[in-house]
Amino acid sequence: MQYTYVYILRCADGSYYTGLTHRTPEERLAEHQSGLVDGFTQSRRPVALVYSESFLNAVDAIAAERRIKGWSRTKKEALITGRFDLLPGLARRKSKP
């Protein structure tokens, strides 16, 4: 049985990176940390793993990753700290026409 993981890294500049992997989040962290992963985190090292969640269904993991990537910083931090009760109230409100 292979899991798919969604993970969040905190970068050296304080930004967050949300990603997806079939390896363990710790293995993926090591790849980011060593510079093997091109892109966003390469110039923002060191990075730290601050959140991960496993999924049996890759489609569910992809949906979760996309959802989290669209969240505000505040909402991501509520997820990271386990403040799930705050998540509904942190939903982005659409402006009135």
Image (spheres, grey):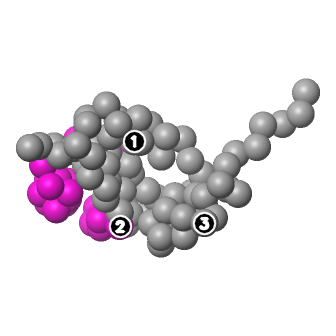
Q: Is residue 35 above or below residue 26?
A: above
Residue at 47% across, 70% down: 82
Q: Earlier in the sequence, mark 1 or mark 3?
A: 1
The residue sitting at the right extreme is: 97
* Highlighted range, magenta: 23-50
Q: Is residue 79 above or below residue 72?
A: below
Q: Is residue 46 magenta?
A: yes
Q: Earlier in the sequence, mark 2 or mark 1?
A: 2
Q: Earlier in the sequence, mark 3 or mark 2?
A: 2
Question: How far apart, in angstroms, are the residues tagged by discs 2 and 1?
Answer: 15 Å
Looking at the rendered structure, the kind of residue marked 2 is Val
Mark 1: few, some, or many residues within 10 Å (few <14, many ≥20)? some
Question: How far apart, in angstroms, are the residues tagged by discs 3 and 2?
Answer: 19 Å
* Residue where numbered disc 3 is placed: 85
Looking at the rendered structure, the kind of residue marked 3 is Asp
* Numbered label attached to residue 65: 1
Question: How far apart, in angstroms, are the residues tagged by discs 1 and 3?
Answer: 20 Å
The residue sitting at the top extreme is: 97
Q: Position of residue 34 (x, y in %)?
A: 13, 58
Residue 1 can be seen in this image:
yes
Q: Position of residue 29 (x, y in %)?
A: 20, 59
The residue sitting at the left extreme is: 1
* Residue where numbered disc 2 is placed: 50
Q: Position of residue 22 (x, y in %)?
A: 16, 43
Looking at the rendered structure, the kind of residue marked 1 is Glu
Answer left or right for 44 relative to 91.
Answer: left
Mark 2: few, some, or many residues within 10 Å (few <14, many ≥20)? some
